[in-house]
Amino acid sequence: MAATRYPQALQHIMSFFGRLPGVGRRTAERLTLAMMAWPEEQIEQFGQALVELKKKVRPCASCGNYAEGELCAICQDPERERGVLCVVEQASQIIVLENSGSYKGLYHVLGGKLSPLSGKGPEALRIKELAARLRQGDISEMIIAISPDVEGEATAHFLAQEFAALPMTITRIASGVPVGADLNFADAATIAIALSGRHQL
Amino acid sequence: MAATRYPQALQHIMSFFGRLPGVGRRTAERLTLAMMAWPEEQIEQFGQALVELKKKVRPCASCGNYAEGELCAICQDPERERGVLCVVEQASQIIVLENSGSYKGLYHVLGGKLSPLSGKGPEALRIKELAARLRQGDISEMIIAISPDVEGEATAHFLAQEFAALPMTITRIASGVPVGADLNFADAATIAIALSGRHQL
């Protein structure tokens, strides 16, 4: 076997790279060997930054986004509309919404979707925290921006029922054919939802 | 800009990933966010392993291969033939030769190729160290396994001249059409060298 020829310390690094998504054994080998050509200080700095990463970057105490202090940059930003709350699955999806440049409200990271089959019930998600924020009464609209798959729809319906009594609008992001996509390649479920959600021109 | 939205510590990690070959800004982002889902201890262990990497893995004092002690695993192996020395550019290429399973001698890492245009002369390579090993007189054959490009050929010729007076055979790995390759896709230079190196069946 090839891998047994590398010193242990190199194999150790390769095993960490290999745990990243889309990085197979060969890519892990290639990345590790490429890094061996870096100056020693640079590899050390990378290592040190990783050691400190989760000490520095914590979930925002309010929304769950990545934050370096108590609150994330968005929660601290006085320019954001505080009456709109967008619920997402993961902190990484906040950037996707921010990149669209069309949302100026706050966020709430749920930490996943309901998934009864894998034993993920409401208590496994940040729903209690969401309830606490909503009960403060400042939110006039909650936008549910969870992926439109089976579990995502179930989660959206659960949230809509759970908070139906609160004096706010609950909305769901639109599903349909992506902008710029070719209809030939749209799946049947997307076509069906795009048809049922049609609007007059 | 999207990147400005991430906490500094996350951007810092992304910048390190982005220095790896084939890792663009988007991939660096994806890898970093995927790693954020790892348990804190695991990220710390990865970081710690990187901090220690270049302290643990040093060039072998004899051949220049990756080594965890004074000498690499190959130089220490009593089973290797000590009369044959294979000269390679980089330590990472030793694995490529080892994987072929058809070489049982020792290695010498040159640390690059001669490149007069970029000011890389013989003194920038590990040629003095090679000379010292060859002068001990135990080597009966030196195989030059440097890539067959322009700089590689120049380096091979330089080495052949430099050590012509020593009582040993100096050989060069064969160039030609790769095993399993389609002749339709071989370049003209490879075809020319494959023709001139033809042998009787």
Image: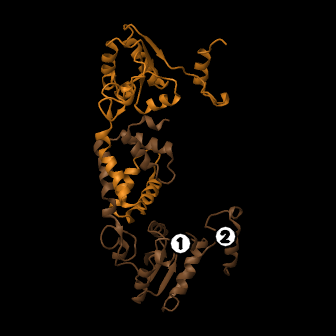
Chain colours: A orange, B brown
Residues flagged by tags 1 and 2 on a common chain? yes
* Mark 2 element type: helix
Q: Position of residue A15 (x, y in %)?
A: 37, 53
- Identify residue type, mark 1: Gly
- Identify residue type, mark 2: Thr
Above or below, comparing residue A132 to residue B54 in the picture:
above
Above or below, comparing residue B63 to residue A61 in the picture:
below
Q: Position of residue B157 (x, y in %)?
A: 57, 81
Quadrant of image for the C terminus of chain B: bottom right
**Chain identity of mark 2:** B
The residue tagged 1 is B119
In the picture, measured across the screen, residue A44 lies left or right of residue B143, that is: left
Q: Position of residue A88 (x, y in %)?
A: 42, 25
Query: What is the crowding at mark 2: few (fewer than 14 residues within 10 Å), some, or many (at least 20)?
Result: some
Q: Residue at x 33, y 48 (%)?
A: A49
Which quarter of the figure has residue B64? Answer: bottom left
Q: Could you tell which of marks 1 and 2 lies nearer the N-terminus?
A: 1
In the picture, measured across the screen, residue B173 lies left or right of residue A23, that is: right
In the picture, measured across the screen, residue A12 lies left or right of residue B93, that is: left
Spatial CA span between label 1 and label 2: 28 Å
The residue tagged 2 is B190
Q: Position of residue B194 (x, y in %)?
A: 67, 74
Above or below, comparing residue B6 to residue A186 in the picture:
below
CB under 8 Å between discs 1 and 2 = no
Q: Residue at x 30, y 27 (%)?
A: A61
**Chain identity of mark 1:** B
**Res. A109 in view:** no
* Mark 1 element type: loop
Q: Residue at x 39, y 66 (%)?
A: A5
Q: Residue at x 68, y 70 (%)?
A: B189
Query: What is the crowding at mark 1: few (fewer than 14 residues within 10 Å), some, or many (at least 20)?
Result: few
